[in-house]
Image: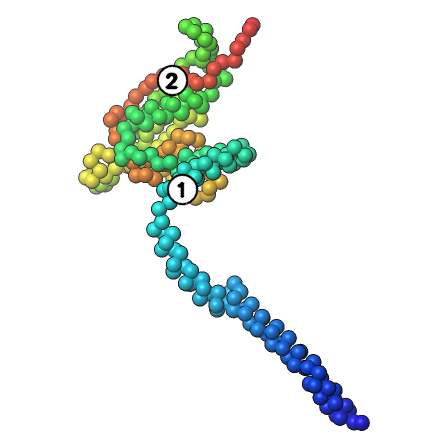
Amino acid sequence: MSLENSIKDVITKKLEDGTIEKLIAEQLENGIKNALKDLLGSYGDVTKVIEKQVKSVMIPYLENYDYSEYITKLDSVLVDVLKSSALENKKMLENFKDLMIPEEMETIKVTDLFERWKKYVEHNVETDDLEVCYEDGPPSFEYVDVRFEVEFNEERSWSSVKHAVLVFECEHDKKMNFEIRIHTWPEFDKGKWTIERNSIHDINSLRYLDEFSILLMKLNQNGTKLILDSDSEGDEIKPDKEPEASFS
């Protein structure tokens, strides 16, 4: 028997017992699977069509949805995360949470902002070098002098904008000091000034911000205008921290 006839006999037998039909079906199935995989993959044509249709429906819906009912839920979630997170992340999340709560004020007087800064100093001022007072009640640290002053820039005669620097100063603890740039267009702002603060571009930076910096950022983001009801003022603050008991 020739080789050609042998091959013909084998093919005939395989056709008769269905082997070739089965192999063709298997390969056809694999081909269909591969084709669908390509069409429905990350960059497949069908996937792109589906993605386009989903975006056309979901994006307008999400943009117009009222999320106010979830604010309390978000607050609860953040509280839970704060309780279980490390100290470094805890500070970042606290600042994020505080930043999300708006300061709903159209204007704020510089004297009121001074009061907010004084509260910040009372809570955070360094007390290591302060004298301890034992008169009139429990021991307490001596009072600390604080002040603010508005330093106006010398503007060009043709300039339509005025600039100034608002300085909050604590001589005892320089870490409490702030220089805040402000500006105004007298023709349009009618005595109101804009607080200039840089935005946060990296969320990790939130962990390094103090509460007064967060306040200034919120005032800037909310467009709260500053009213200079005074150019300078001084006062004394009592540190919140209490001296440790001494039995000497």
- Going 29% across and 25% down the picture, which residue do you hit? 111
Q: Nearer the viewer, mark 2 or mark 1?
A: 1
Q: Is residue 146 visible?
A: yes
Give the color scheme: rainbow, by chain, secondary structure or one colour.
Answer: rainbow
Quadrant of the rendered image containing residue 190: top left
Say above or below: 193 vs 67: above
- Going 42% across and 41% down the picture, which residue do you hit? 200
Q: In the rendered view, does 142 fall on the left or right side of 43? A: left
Which structural element holds mark 1? helix
Q: In the rendered view, does 146 fall on the left or right side of 162? A: right
Q: Nearer the viewer, residue 14 or 170?
A: 14
Mark 1 crowdedness (10 Å alpha carbons): few <14, some 14-19, many ≥20 = few
Q: Nearer the viewer, residue 123 or 79?
A: 79
In percent of width and height, residue 87 lies at 53, 32
Given the image, on which type of amino acid does mark 2 rest?
Ile
In percent of width and height, residue 94 lies at 46, 34
Quadrant of the rendered image containing residue 125: top left
Quadrant of the rendered image containing residue 161: top left
Which residue was labeled with disc 2? 237
Say above or below: 151 vs 19: above
